[in-house]
Image (tube, rainbow, N blue to C red):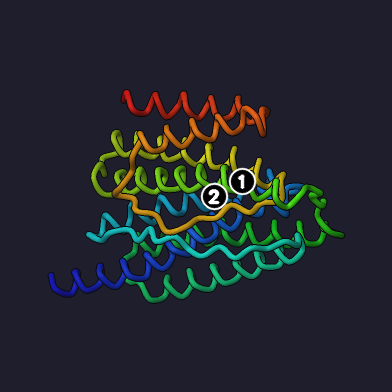
């Protein structure tokens, strides 16, 4: 029994390192798709969605082994040049493949080894896709010509919503992984997390159009307040009525979904 517990503990440590890597990839790829690499946005988003599946698989495996998923946010460095971004993506995939292969060698549990081998297949294809995108990419991304003060005001307003959606997303995921591990309830929490990710995407794309990179600060996933979220969105909506009317349909859609969550 002690040997099994030791194996599980060792596997959890390595899997949490893999989970952090997937978390980093998700935020990094989403940021690229919303900002400097918008011309390849759809393809990069598809890769990010694959990483989200890996994130889910790893987290549930960690819980199965008696561990707790580490949802610490990574530090997403800004990239303003599309070719530099894609080069970093290629490097990130190479590093991920190397790390997974190393962990496959170091983990003795067959089901976990099989999971990591399955993930490596996806990562190898991501590497191929990013290399192809890099080969196809020439020149600089489109320039955003807007007054700095105006951009700053937009960033201040919209960044509030990014932080809240990110906080909600992580909180729902942790509840899914830890409190409601059963499939039926877990999927409900995961579906709510997906909603928050979609909301982040809507806001993130708008920020990217203004040349603003979303930030993902440290958040307390145990302190999720729907009342605070609704209040901030209503403040942002009031600002948008004057400064950015085109945002109103998006904000109203998010508010409607958040109000629906509260009733569930």
For the residues labelled 2 and 1, the Cα–Cα distance comes to: 6 Å
* In front of the other: 246 or 98: 246
Q: Could you say which is closer to the camera, residue 37 or residue 16?
A: 37
Q: Is residue 81 left or right of residue 122?
A: right
Residue 74, position as x, y percentages in the image: 48, 63
For the N terminus, the quadrant is: bottom left
Residue 78 picture location, percent across and down: 64, 63
**Crowd class of label 2 (few under 14; some 14 to 19; many from 20; radius 10 Å):** some
Residue at (26, 44) in percent of width and height: 181
Residue 46: which numbered mark, if any?
1
Image coords of residue 152 (percent x, y): 65, 50
Q: Nearer the viewer, residue 166 or 146?
A: 146
> Do the residues bearing badges 2 and 1 touch, measured as CB atoms within 8 Å?
yes
Q: Residue at x 73, y 52 (%)?
A: 148
For this view, does 115 lie left or right of residue 88?
Answer: left
Q: How many labels, in total?
A: 2
User: Which quadrant of the figure contains the C terminus?
Assistant: top left
Residue extending furthest right? 139
Question: Which residue is rendered at x = 31% and y = 39% of the image?
Answer: 186
Residue hosting label 2: 50
In-image side of 115 versus 183 (left or right): right
Q: Is residue 209 left or right of residue 73?
A: right
In the structure shown, which secondary structural element does the residue marked by tag 2 occupy? helix
Q: Quadrant of residue 19?
A: bottom left
């Amino acid at each position: 029994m002690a040997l099994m517990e030791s194996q599980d503990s060792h596997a959890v440590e390595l899997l949490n390192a893999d989970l952090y890597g997937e978390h980093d990839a998700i935020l990094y790829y989403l940021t690229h798709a919303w900002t400097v690499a918008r011309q390849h946005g759809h393809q990069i988003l598809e890769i990010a969605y694959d990483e989200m599946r890996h994130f889910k698989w790893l987290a549930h495996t960690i819980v199965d082994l008696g561990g707790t998923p580490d949802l610490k946010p990574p530090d997403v460095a800004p990239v303003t040049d599309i070719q530099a971004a894609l080069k970093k993506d290629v490097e990130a995939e190479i590093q991920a493949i190397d790390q997974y292969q190393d962990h496959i060698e170091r983990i003795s549990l067959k089901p976990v080894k099989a999971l990591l081998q399955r993930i490596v297949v996806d990562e190898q294809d991501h590497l191929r896709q990013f290399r192809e995108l890099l080969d196809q990419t020439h020149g600089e991304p489109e320039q955003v010509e807007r007054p700095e003060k105006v951009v700053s005001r937009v960033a201040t307003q919209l960044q509030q919503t990014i932080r809240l959606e990110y906080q909600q997303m992580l909180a729902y995921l942790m509840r899914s992984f830890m409190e409601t591990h059963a499939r039926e309830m877990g999927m409900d929490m995961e579906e709510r997390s997906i909603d928050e990710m979609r909301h982040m995407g809507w806001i993130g794309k708008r920020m990217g159009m203004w040349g603003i990179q979303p930030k993902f600060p440290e958040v307390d996933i145990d302190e999720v307040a729907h009342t605070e979220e609704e209040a901030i969105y209503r403040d942002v909506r009031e600002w948008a009525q004057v400064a950015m009317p085109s945002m109103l349909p998006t904000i109203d859609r998010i508010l409607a979904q958040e109000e629906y969550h509260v009733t569930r």
